[in-house]
Image (cartoon, helix red, strand yellow):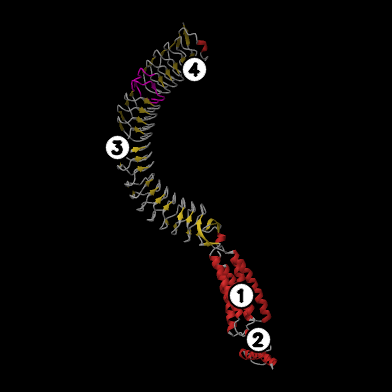
Amino acid sequence: MIEENYKKAVNYEYGLDVKKDYREALKYYKLASKENSHARKKVIYSHFSVIEAILLLIVLIMGIIIDLKITFPWVGLFLIGISFTGITLFYMKKYWILTGYANILNTVILFLALVVILPYSVIKPYLNGITWIPVVLLFSAAIFIFLSALVLFFVDRNKTLLVVSIIGFLMLMGSIISFGIKTPDKLFNFKKVDEGIVITGYRSSGKKLKIPNKISGYDVVGIDDNAFSEWQFEEVILNNKLKYLGSYAFKNNRALKKIVIPDGVVLGYGVFSGNHSLEEIVLPSDLKKIPYALCSGCFSLNEVEIPSSVTIIQEEAFMNTGLTKIKLPENLVYLGGDAFSQTKIETLNLPNSLEYLGKLSNMPFLKSFNFPTSLNALPSGFLLGNKEIKELVIPFHIKYIGSYAFSKTNLETVVLHDEIFYEEGLFFQAEHLKQFTFPRSMDYIPKEMFSFSGIEEVCIPKFINSVGINAFAYAKSLKTLTLEEGVKLLESGAFMYTESLTSVEIPESVIMMGSDLFKGAAKLESIKIPSHTTKIPDRFLEDAYLLREINLVDNIKVIGKAGLKNTSLTSVILPKELETIEDYGFFGNKKLISVTFNDKLKTIKTHSFGSNTSLKILDFPLSLEKIDDYSFNGCNNLEYVSIKENVKMVGYWAFRSNPNMIIYITNNSYIDDWSREWNPFSAQILQN
């Protein structure tokens, strides 16, 4: 009877000689299940398998745990998909009631795994920057599903298996195609750091750059120094997880027109420097510091909004941009030098919170600014190159002005209070400055303070002890110079090339005069020096072409090198104490007709009187011991020279002068020691 029931069940299951009826088949399988193991299995698999349910649940829980525990959140999902596929394929043949809920549920789980879970487990890591590992796994799984389902279809002719095989084939094709997709780990060079991924370079040639949220499962937290330097992107999109942009990350990207930087991003030096086409930059609302040269060289950047959170703007931040105006944050404490150099900004409203102010140099259009009360110093080169500001009054809270602060400006009037201290070159090349009143706080005029300036009139008061090196050098408009009694030191080149000066009186209080003091004072006609002077400094009046008068006081012992070279002196009475005339001392004085030598002169050095074409008579004193090489070379109109007995040496071409002159040599026993070429034109020599 049992075998009879089993046969009826089979007939109803497969429709053998009767109409297929799963309900009748199940009834007879139950009757036969007591003695027939196959019948018992049929009864069991008429319902969804508890074991399968447990296996699916275990896989699901394990997959979730894996994705929660490890860095790569796609691994657990992929394991769920592949396990669900394998389990449901295994149970597919067991669920013989094709219209039953168990088979339908099993099939739904199978297609859910194939169509949703497995593809998503690859798409998810793709979106998170992981590509080849899940794609390779999907490729392997797709081959297995495609081939195994196809084989099972030919065995059982189950159309569901054919559909599974087709899905496996499509997955296989999709995985192959995906290998060619440019995904983040293919597009970027990168390195792993503690916080996540830092992008170091780019592998594509695209004009649009989008920074991904993740690469290889890690957050992209930074862009390395110079990562995209010299790339020509037309569009750049930064992700919201970025923490920093490295120095010069987008330097010289000349195609980029706009950039939006997410909140929370810290910026390195010169990130967008040289971006010539950049027209708009949106800075993070929580930005604290604008770094060095951030937008330097962004010619097209005409406007920028600085967030209120910014407290520091470093040097050259917006140098050489198209900015015409700027609003500084109220809490700004540091404004670096040249932050707005070479811009078109006309007005700067500096907040009173400012603790450090760098130079505002090379801002040629700047017309007005204020001195915050929090400041007590102006830096070196403060207004260098400004062309618009004409007048300046320095407030009392400013106690110090750095070197060259007003250099190359068009300042006409500057008022300094009596408690201020300033450094060298204050008005260097300030060509429009005509006069100046010295504050009592300074007892010296620093180096190059008025060099190349337009100053016309100067009175150096008695409380000034010294005038520094080149202090008024090349002040070519200086016409009037008054030195009050009390000035002590005139350093080298202090008034060199003051080409409009006509006369100078140096007070008796001056105890030291440096070299080149009035060198190049081309219109200087007369000068009076202190009576205690012991040396005419080197190049003291060299190229003072119109000089006709100088009081060579008796205390002078040395005429320095080129000290009175190229003047218009017509006659010279050498000082009583003079011992040495250095090289080129009186060289090139073409109007010099007579020289009266003193009784203590010992040495006339090289070229001392060279090219003095008006000299006719030289009557050397008994004290003279040495006439050096070329001393009177080029004195072409010499007629009479008298050399006394103490002259021990006459140098090479010392008298290469007029071949028709007469040289008288008196009782000189050293003549054989003189240079053989001391008289190269063989002028007539008379000895006694």
Quadrant position of residue 263: bottom left
Q: CA distance from mark 1 to mark 3?
A: 92 Å
Q: Earlier in the sequence, mark 3 or mark 2?
A: 2
Q: CA distance from mark 2 to mark 4?
A: 138 Å
Q: Which mark is residue 40?
A: 2
Say which of 429 and 271 sits in front.
271
Q: CA distance from mark 3 to mark 2?
A: 115 Å
Q: Earlier in the sequence, mark 2 or mark 4?
A: 2
Q: CA distance from mark 1 to mark 4?
A: 113 Å
Residue 562 sits inside the magenta stretch? no
Residue highlighted by disc 3: 418
Say which of 467 and 652 sits in front.
467
**236 to 155, vertically: above or below:** above
Q: Tell me the residue at 41%/12% (across/down).
A: 621
Provide the major secondary structure of the magenta segment: loop
Q: Which residues are magenta?
A: 529-556
Q: Which mark is residue 653?
A: 4
Q: CA distance from mark 3 to mark 4?
A: 59 Å
Q: Earlier in the sequence, mark 3 or mark 4?
A: 3
Q: Position of residue 490 (x, y in %)?
A: 36, 28
- Residue 213 visible to an observer of this rendering: yes
